[in-house]
Amino acid sequence: MNDIHIIRRTVATMANQLHKLGYPLSNAFKTAWKRVKESMTCRVSGVTYGKRQKLLQFIANRKPEDLTVYLQRDRANTFDKFAVAVVVGISNIGYAHIGYLPSGLSQSLAKVIDKGIGLQADVKVIGGYGYKETLGALINITV
């Protein structure tokens, strides 16, 4: 019974934030319910910055059960006040910041994270098929 309260709270928080961003209230609730029901899959932004390509290569060689994905608010980010960092924990090794959620999704999820509602996520490294082709990451987020 407690799970339904968490889901409703998540949907209400997300819908209110979408409404503040200009969505009509009915569309905001429809979008929020759709995101919660179907999960959210997107590409991680900023994966080519710094040494993140080497981190992604290292993560690609690990088993999925050895990886834990954390979504953390980045309040120090001066470019985006709703920035949500994607951090991957590698068992027995440490943590790696691989990028950020896209701004459209982070705007609605930032308030959910601020309220302390738990989100589960998993990451999959993609790309790197040809010579000098960059790697990317897909993240799947569920409530």
Image (cartoon, rainbow, N blue to C red):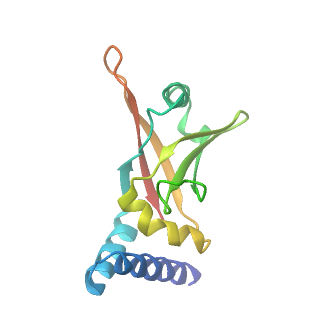
User: Does residue 141 appear to the left or right of 63 in the view shown?
Assistant: left
User: Does residue 33 appear to the left or right of 94 in the view shown?
Assistant: left
At 48% from the left and 27% from the top, the residue drawn is 53
x and y percent of residue 78 in the render? 53, 54
x and y percent of residue 25 in the render? 30, 86
Quick check: can you spot residue 117? no
**Quadrant position of residue 108:** bottom left
User: Does residue 29 appear to the left or right of 88 in the view shown?
Assistant: left
In the displayed structure, 133 sits above or below 71; it is above
At 40% from the left and 29% from the top, the residue drawn is 135
**Quadrant position of residue 55:** top right
At 56% from the left and 84% from the top, the residue drawn is 1
In the displayed structure, 99 sits above or below 109; it is above
x and y percent of residue 112 in the render? 52, 71
Residue at the extreme top of the image, as rendered = 131
At 58% from the left and 67% from the top, the residue drawn is 118
Please count the marks in the image.
0
Residue at the extreme right of the image, as rendered = 92
